[in-house]
Amino acid sequence: MMGPAPTGEQLCGAIGEPEVMEPALEGTGKEGKKASSRKRTLAEPPAKGLLQPVKLSRAELYKEPTNEELNHLRETEILFHSSLLRLQVEELLKEVRLSEKKKDRIDAFLREVNQRVVRVPSVPETELTDQAWLPAGVRVPLHQVPYAVKGCFRFLPPAQVTVVGSYLLGTCIRPDINVDVALTMPREILQDKDGLNQRYFRKRALYLAHLAYHLAQDPLFGSVCFSYTNGCHLKPSLLLRPRGKDERLVTVRLHPCPPPDFFRPCRLLPTKNNVRSAWYRGQSPAGDGSPEPPTPHYNTWVLQDTALESHLQLLSTMLGSAQGLKDGVALLKVWLRQRELDKGQGGFTGFLVSMLVVFLVSTHKIHTTMSGYQVLRSVLQFLATTDLTVNGISLCLSSDPSLPALADFHQAFSVVFLDSSGRLNLCADVTASTYHQVQYEARLSMTLLDSRADDGFQLLLMTPKPMIRAFDHVLHLHPLSRLQAACHRLKLWPELQDNGGDYVSAALGPLTTLLEQGLGTRLKLLAHSRPPVPEWGISQDPPKHKGSGSLTLGLLLRPEGLTSVLELGPEADQPEAAKFRQFWGFRSELRRFQDGAIREAVVWEAASMSQKRLIPHQVVTHLLALHTDIPETCVHYVGGPLDALIQGLKQTSSTGEEALAVAVCCYDDLSRLLWGLEGLPLTVSAVQGAHPVLRYTEVFPPTPVRPASSFYEPLQERSSLLPRLDKPCPAYVEPMTVVCHLEGSGQWPQDAEAVQRVRAAFQLRLAELLTQQHGLQCRATATHTDVLKDGFVFRIRVAYQREPQILKEVQSPEGMISLRDTPASLHLERDTRQLPLLTSALHGLQQQHPAFSGVARLAKRWVRAQLLGEDFTDESLDLVAAALFLHPEPFTPPSSPQVGFLRFLYLVSTFDWKNNPLIVNLNNELTVEEQVEIRSGFLAARTQLPVMVIVTPQDRKHSVWTQDGPSAQILQQLVVLAAEALPMLEKQLMDPRGPGDIRTVFRPPLDIYDVLIRLSPRHIPRHRQAVDSPAASFCRGLLSQPGPSSLMPVLGYDPPQLYLMQLREAFGDLALFFYDQHGGEVIGVLWKPTSFQPQPFKASSTKGRMVMSRGGELVMVPNVEAILEDFAVLGEGLVQTVEARSERWTV
């Protein structure tokens, strides 16, 4: 008895699994479960799992709408732009809101916390520097540098415990529920001058340390630990989580704060100093009477603690009863979280957007009756059009002359948004880079909302935008301790004093400004990661400034400015020339230009396109070393690690764009020769390319070939070559297809066979004329003419425009002629009309987006490396790559192959192939209405369409490029592999120590196959193109000096592919065969599940089977041993071993 392994095991769990849910998006609980139907059920029959319209009875269908329904419809029309959007928004809000049950459990926990906090015992008064009273199990959660400070401290239970923040307002969102609790410290603890020299912050930290020690002993709490408030190293908070099953329910954050009106506001203005240089640096101020530097950030952090309750009152007054405003805040928080803008130090937090909503309500830009969606739109519109780094805003309506001016705040802070007191800048910690990133994202989102796309909601609120997938290049500064030296070099003493020694925050602003200036026109946006705020146990020392790992910068590049190797400076005699020289250092040199001007200039070394893409790397490392003493070894630049996978054998400095351009140039020359041919009976009406090389998407571009005669036996009578058996297989040469259309004429016959014969005559005549008039080596056949030009081989196919129509003609017995699609007519139309159109459209796309070639080639390299290349046509994968450039939302089109490839993996793994066609709107020919029509037509005809449907303006109904595959199982396998590869590759690229072995995600999983056929490298012509390129391979019979060749090379000779054809022909009914055409050494074999089912005995179907008696009947089962032996016999000389994994099936 024999049977296959369960199908689930065969394709990595893909074939047998009926459903694969997309991973839940970080930050929004179970999004996707309801908000959009994103289940994929590819392994089931197409009818199953499809979205079907709800069937209603006639009475229900024509029932009059109720008043409630009419109101709902009117609201939808006014407040949302479609019913679908309203449903999606309501479902999302349901998902992220807290349920009443959970609120009750959280409230109960908060009451317990309150009871325990007020019962913590007091401590007698001691000097601030005498901390011997602290118990052994707890450390002060603050770096006390310098240690000596005046003042006394005693512990008393808090005078008041107040819940502040979004929990009470009902705007906090799952899954991370944090409740902020303010503990008002009694006045007796504080002294008049506590605002100076970190005294208040030291007392605050000691207060928390004592609380932490006592609360940690309470069995109510599952964890008690410290964390920094918004990443500020001077302001720790105490985190409490319940014990048991509710541990992940909530995190309560305790924030000690001073009594209201304790600090005099005039002492905490942004122009005042509260950290004395003599105390902080241990040196007396310069005797020249220069004033102390202001400490605006330090002052703001003190002010923040005094304003916790007043902010809560303002928010509850404004948002209290307006559900639409609360919904808007929740949606904005989801929007920020998906873009990673709200996390860590200097993030654009949920509190800031809540205050922004209050500001817009107070200026009548938002009305309290608006829906959540309208609030989201209004805030995004405001952010997109208002630059708070130039024109700050204020919630303060008072005209008190003692209040500081906005200009004072602009001088001290990058971003200005004042609270209702007019003294506290809410955006004090937000850097200019972060705000510009928020602005940029808001502009993209507004464009997306204005386009009214069907999937706008999905792209805006459900698609995560991690830094590595949103930016073209990223760079990691590691270790962070190098920024300390940068602060010294940039003379940032006042900033260090202001930030309490946090050199990362002090250096960040000057660092980003320096790089923005240096990258200039190459840069669209520079963003920095906000290092996550760490948590640490109460018995540990607080993490050091360098403890947050690495600082990551993301560069979004302008493709138009990227390829310039020249930074042009001012003329030599201009006063700006000295500044230019100082900025660029030794790289700046005087140069004379063609117009006679002598200018300062910087020239970068970059010959190929891939090197030009990496010029920002040279700029960044040069400027950081020159101005900040950060050496190149500490800058880990991630811009082109994947380039190695599409580099040719000897072209380690190029990713092949130049070689493709040479081939395209040669094609252009040939097409000119064809246009100008004299002596053809009909003139040439069009010459069109129809090969991946001619649309820049061939993974490994062809090189000019000049065969070495020692590898071949010449066949003189046919002026051809024959590979010699005693030599390794010669180099693989693929001819590039060119379609040559001839003008219409009444002389063309109207019979299909006659047309073919006339075409054959034209092929022969073409070869004669090209040889006579231009001396080109040609070989003609009935269907094509191969032409050797400059070492490249082109396959010219003559086409007649009416031929597909002639093939469609079907004559009835009565003599009536009707037109009907036949396989032959469809095939011919695809090859002579649709393929050239597609090639020219993608050629145009490459001219617009220079990164398209690299992205499409990386995508194809990966699919083929997974041994799935045979199932996906070149054209289908090119179109998926094109979709990333034509429909990049919510991103912008990629400017580097790396980020494009990551998005390709994301698109393949998350797109709902079953319920949606992938619309690739080439040349923007499809209108919105036509796209809606295509989608509805798709759903109506879903069962007749292929598993993977790709629609273009020329192919709106049939998806011609996916008609022959992939099957549901193969597509599902690709989805699974992409979903596994994406997080692995993103983790590698975001590793600050360098990406490690980048080829890991390209290596195929071989453990899923039943049989592995290993091939001899001697007969694999493309052996050097393998993912793991061999250290040494065989010579392939090419002369290194290309020159005129009198003989046509052997075309399309690839023994593994020929062997595969034989295997499929002989055993295609029993097994599937998988192979990587780019130098793969292994063929993977999977038995078909049906092949092991016993078949009734028939003399006509004995191939590969043996006869057994079962239950008195003769049945046939596969003869596996004989089949495996046949595998080896068929591939004699090519096959090294046949490795059977017999544990995967039963005999």
Image: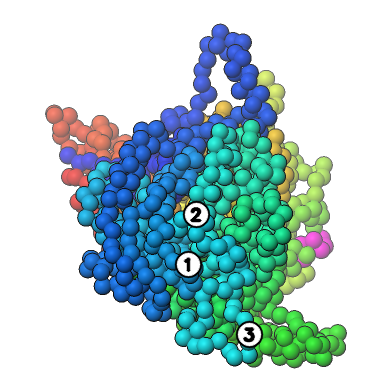
- Residue 362 is left or right of residue 1003, and the answer is right
Magenta highlight range: 673-679
Question: Which one is nearer the viewer's eye here, 1082 or 797?
Answer: 1082
Q: Are marks 1 and 2 in contact (CB under 8 Å)?
A: no
Image location (x, y in percent) of residue 335: 55, 48
Which mark, by number, is residue 290?
3
Residue at the limit of the structure toward the left, as seen here: 1112
Colour option used? rainbow
User: Is label 3 or label 1 in front?
Assistant: 1
Residue beneath the point at 24% across and 47% down: 220
Image location (x, y in percent) of residue 483: 49, 79
Q: Is residue 127 above or below residue 327?
A: below
Image location (x, y in percent) of residue 705: 58, 74
**Residue 675 sits inside the magenta stretch:** yes
Identity, as a three-letter code, of the amino acid under mark 1 = Asp
Quadrant containing the N terminus in the rendered view: top left
Q: Which of marks 1 and 2 is nearer the N terminus?
A: 1
| Residue carrying label 1 | 192
Q: Label 2 neighbourhood size at 10 Å, few (<14), some (14-19), many (20+)?
A: some
